[in-house]
Structures are given as C-alpha cells and as structure tokens.
Image (cartoon, rainbow, N blue to C red):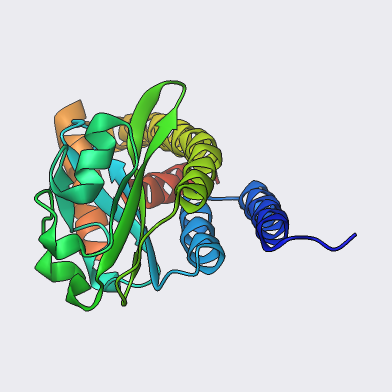
C-alpha cells in the first residue's frame, strides 16, 4: 500500500522528533543541549533560524541563550520582557504564536543586536516544564511562510521535550555551582587559618592577602587557597 503525502510527512516528523530526543539525551552540558536543540530544530522545521530564550533569575526577562541564525554576539545580551515581542507573548500566554510577516504583527519587537531584520516569518512556542514557563523557543525564515497546525504542533512537542531536559540541565548547573562555591569557601577558610597562624594576623587581613595574591596572579581565590594549603601540607 502506497503512503499518502500526509503519512510520509507524519513519519518524517516522528523520525525527526526521535532524532532530537536522542541527541538531547546524549548531551552532557547545558551549553551543548542548547546548541543541539537549536541546530536540530532548525533542520527539522526547515527554518533559517532557531533560537532559545530562557527566563532570567528575576523571572521578568527572556534572555537569548542559543541561536542558529541570529548574531552570535547577541547571545546572553538580547532580552525581551515577558509579553514583549511574539516570543515574549508566547511565553506570557503559554501558547504558540505564529506570523507569516512578523514585522506586521502588533506584538512584534525588533532586537537590533540580533540582526534579525533578514527574517520575515516567525513561530514561537513556550518552554514549559512541570507547568511552569521557563522560556520560549522560536524558528524564523527569510521568506514569508504560513505555519500549518501540524508544524505548530511539531514545534510544540519539540519544546515540551526540550523544556524537560533544559530544566534538568539548569538544575544540575545550579547544584554544580553551589557545590563549587561551597568547596571554594572551605579551601579559603583553611588557607586563612594557615596565614593567620603563620603571620599572626586576623581573619580579615588573611582574607585580604588571598584576594591580593589572586588579583596580582590573575588567578581564582580557590587556586591561591589551594597553593597555600599545598605549601603548608608539605
């Protein structure tokens, strides 16, 4: 039995979704996950650009964290208020937003640092993890393009998969950062103790010495603390 065009398209979309899921699962860092999502999604959606915006710590702004087609220097700098622009609107409403001519849409917001003036159409969907919006994912094309329901649904499914993985990666990164900070604090405290004993100085002066050495040597306080401890332990 010969497959219809609709069946072929559906099968291709399922295969593409499976490919994205496997690629994301194999990634080992937040940066790699972000890069894989944007690259694979742009390919699957036949788009010229795919970008991911994540909520900042205050929950008021969406910050560009990864992109395939926008200016790379805008990553980490370009931002939208929640509800601002089509992407911000998708995050605020928790629903997809599509426009074949994005610049004509009343929600459109141009971010000059992204150099996105070359793109016409835009489809944005929210990134929702455990019922909470953590950002938004969008695709753009240079030519005007209508997004049919099945393509909107496909990007929404990709966003659902991506959101779960991104939430885990963000949590691991946060835990890793807290662990690093705790270990550094312990090392600095130990190094301060050695300096206080060796030079008969108070805690504040010992800390200032570690800070000064780190600044002069252009190294982290952890590296200086480890060096002090190593000398004392010999």
Quadrant in which residue 73 is drawn: bottom left
Residue 31 placement, left or right of 15: left
Residue sitting at x 25%, y 31%: 93
Apparent side of residue 219 relative to residue 108 in the rendered image (left or right): right
Up the image or down, 6 lies above or below 92; here it is below
Q: Residue furthest top?
A: 131
Q: Is residue 214 above or below residue 218?
A: above
**Where residue 78 sits in the image (x, y, percent)?**
18, 58
- Residue 229 percent across, percent down from the top left: 45, 42
Is residue 137 among the parts visible in the rendering?
A: yes
Q: On the rendered structure, is 26 left or right of 214?
A: right
Q: Evaluate whether residue 218 shows in this view.
A: no
- Total label count? 0
User: Which of 188 and 89 lies nearest the eye of the viewer?
Assistant: 89
Query: On screen, 165 above or below 101?
Result: above
Front residue of this view, candidates 42 and 162: 42
Q: Position of residue 90 (x, y in %)?
A: 27, 40
Query: Which residue corresponds to the image point at 24% horizontal and 55% vertical from the top-left?
Result: 213
Q: Quadrant of the N terminus?
A: bottom right
Quarter of the view holding residue 74? bottom left
């Amino acid at each position: 039995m010969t497959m219809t065009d609709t069946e072929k398209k559906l099968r291709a979309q399922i295969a593409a979704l499976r490919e994205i899921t496997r690629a994301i699962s194999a990634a080992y860092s937040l940066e790699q996950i972000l890069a894989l999502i944007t690259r694979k999604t742009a390919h699957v959606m036949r788009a010229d650009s795919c970008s991911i915006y994540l909520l900042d710590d205050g929950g008021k702004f969406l910050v560009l964290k990864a992109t395939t087609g926008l200016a790379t220097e805008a990553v980490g700098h370009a931002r939208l208020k929640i509800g601002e622009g089509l992407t911000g609107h998708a995050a605020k409403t928790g629903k997809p937003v599509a426009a074949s001519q994005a610049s004509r849409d009343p929600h459109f917001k141009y971010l000059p640092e992204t150099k996105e003036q070359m793109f016409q159409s835009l489809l944005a969907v929210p990134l929702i993890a455990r019922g909470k919006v953590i950002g938004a994912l969008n695709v753009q094309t240079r030519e005007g393009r209508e997004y049919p329901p099945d393509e909107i649904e496909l990007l929404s499914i990709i966003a659902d998969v991506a959101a779960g993985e991104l939430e885990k990666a963000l949590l691991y990164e946060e835990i890793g950062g807290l662990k690093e900070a705790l270990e550094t604090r312990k090392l600095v405290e130990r190094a301060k103790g050695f300096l206080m004993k060796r030079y008969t100085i108070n805690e504040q002066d010992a800390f200032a010495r570690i800070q000064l050495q780190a600044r002069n040597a252009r190294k982290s306080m952890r590296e200086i603390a480890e060096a002090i401890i190593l000398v004392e332990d010999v």
